[in-house]
Amino acid sequence: MEENKYMTFLKSVGKEIKETVLTKSYGCYVALAAWLLTLIQIITYGFVSVELFHSGVIVSSVLGVIFFIILSLFRKTSPLAPVILMVCDIVALLSFASADGIVDVFSTLFFDGFSLGKLFTLPTAEWMSIFSFVLSFLISSVAVYLPQNKKTTVKEKIKEEEVAEVV
């Protein structure tokens, strides 16, 4: 009897996940682009120099990637997925800005003025990390305001309520 309850529960969760995945809207794809940049950020940040490395960047980025996936699986929590990704991206950016050697590296590099050419003289991992921090934060900020799932019609809501009453 108890095993039947668990199977029913797992089937309903599986059905919810399937329905959520099938009804994704364009906002989810924008948030997915930010998620992909965050994933790239995790990979490239591992190659930055020791003086620019801060463990908070990796921790917050990994948490953002994991929580985004978990929250995107259900219709009720889908709108929160880009929010948590945005928060984790800004925490990663702030952690990067608080690295011990960041002032030394950038003050030496930009001693006689700022230019994008000088920025690209940094090793690839460092400038790629900087751009992925900023872009993933901006894209996830935009995705917060876009719909993550298609709206359900009145007929679908009635059908969902009937299914909920049966279970």
Image (cartoon, rainbow, N blue to C red):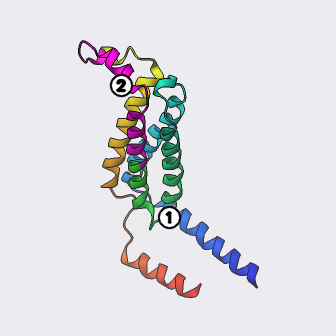
Task: Residue at 51% x, 29% y: name it.
Answer: 44
Picture disc at residue 74: 1
| Helix, strand or loop status at disc 2 | helix
Q: Is residue 100 magenta?
A: yes
Span highlighted in magenta in the image: 88-117
Q: Distance between the residues labelled 2 and 1?
A: 42 Å
- Residue 21: image x %, image y %? 51, 58
Horizontally, residue 94 falls left or right of residue 163, namely left
| Helix, strand or loop status at disc 1 | loop
Amino acid at dot 1: Phe
Q: Mark 2 points at which residue?
A: 103
Taking the view exactly as shown, the residue that stands out farthest to the bottom is: 165
Q: Is residue 97 above or below residue 166?
A: above
Amino acid at dot 2: Val
- Dot in front, 2 or 1: 2
Picture disc at residue 1: none
Q: In this view, does 159 lie above or below 132?
A: below
Task: Residue at 54% x, 32% y: name it.
Answer: 43
Q: Is residue 160 magenta?
A: no
Mark 2, Cα crowd under 10 Å, few <14 / some 14-19 / many 20+, is some
- Residue 76: image x %, image y %? 44, 68
Task: Residue at 36% x, 42% y: name it.
Answer: 137
Is 84 in front, or is 1? 84
- Residue 145: image x %, image y %? 30, 55
Is 144 in front, or is 110? 110
